[in-house]
Image (cartoon, grey):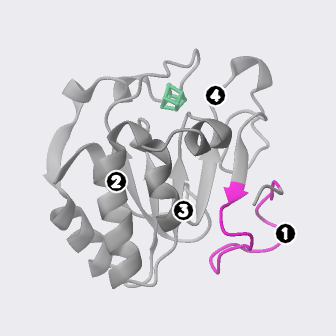
Amino acid sequence: MQICILDILEQTMADGPGFRTAIYCAGCEHHCPGCHNPQSWDRKNGHWVDVQEILDVIKADEMSNVSFSGGDPLYQVEAFTELARRIKEETGKTIWCWTGFTYEEILADERLSMILPYLDVIVDGPFKMELRDTQLLFRGSSNQRIIYLHGEQPDDSIPGTVPIVGIK
Ligand code: SF4
């Protein structure tokens, strides 16, 4: 199975707490006005990489946790689910995932929700220019929420540094 990616950023500190390996995928149909990365909308700007190859990069860095961003990973939900499942089975790493879908939209869609058991955190919802707030950590606009999917903060969250929205 392959994922169309723009880039893999190693040891970034911009995509969630602590050091992370960030997988930036290509492809997003939300087309939010003011999007920080409009070149990510078109898959033609990306290239296809095997899940195994991405996993090898992730596993080579023992220290970093993992982030899925883009683009919107949920437009490639089958392949990202396979990657997330293997990360969870083969490493102790946490996974944060940014998506333009809301949590409620994901829950209501059987296909999109297949990835949820393997993620620790989603940052959900489209970017909304009228709600843009540069003070927010890891989010562009205040409608977007940091959601701990399994009820508790994962080990890589640092109390006091990550805003928590209380949806479990
Ligand atoms: S969901 Fe994210 S990547 Fe997609 S258009 Fe909106 S801000 Fe851009």
Q: Residues within 10 Å of mark 3 (few under 14, many from 20)?
A: some
Q: Distance between the Cα atoms at labels 3 and 2?
A: 21 Å
Direction from residue 70 to residue 149 in the image, left or right: right
Residue 122 in the image, given as x and y percentages of width and height: 60, 53
Q: Distance between the Cα atoms at labels 1 and 3?
A: 17 Å
Residue 162 in the image, given as x and y percentages of width and height: 76, 62
**Which mark is in front, 1 or 4?**
4
Which circle marks residue 160 in the picture? 1
Which circle's residue, 3 or 2, is located before the other in the chain?
Answer: 3
Which circle's residue, 1 or 4, is located before the other in the chain?
Answer: 4
Q: Which amino acid type is shown beneath numbered disc 1?
A: Gly
Residue at 16% from the left image edge and 51% from the top image edge:
49
**Which mark is in front, 3 or 4?**
4
The range drawn in magenta is 147-165
Residue at 78% from the left image edge and 55% from the top image edge:
167
Element on which disc 1 rests: loop
| Residue that label 2 marks | 80
| Residue that label 3 marks | 13
Which circle's residue, 3 or 4, is located before the other in the chain?
Answer: 3
| Residue that label 4 marks | 127
Element on which disc 4 rests: loop
Q: Distance between the Cα atoms at labels 1 and 2?
A: 30 Å
Residue 55 in the image, given as x and y percentages of width and height: 25, 69
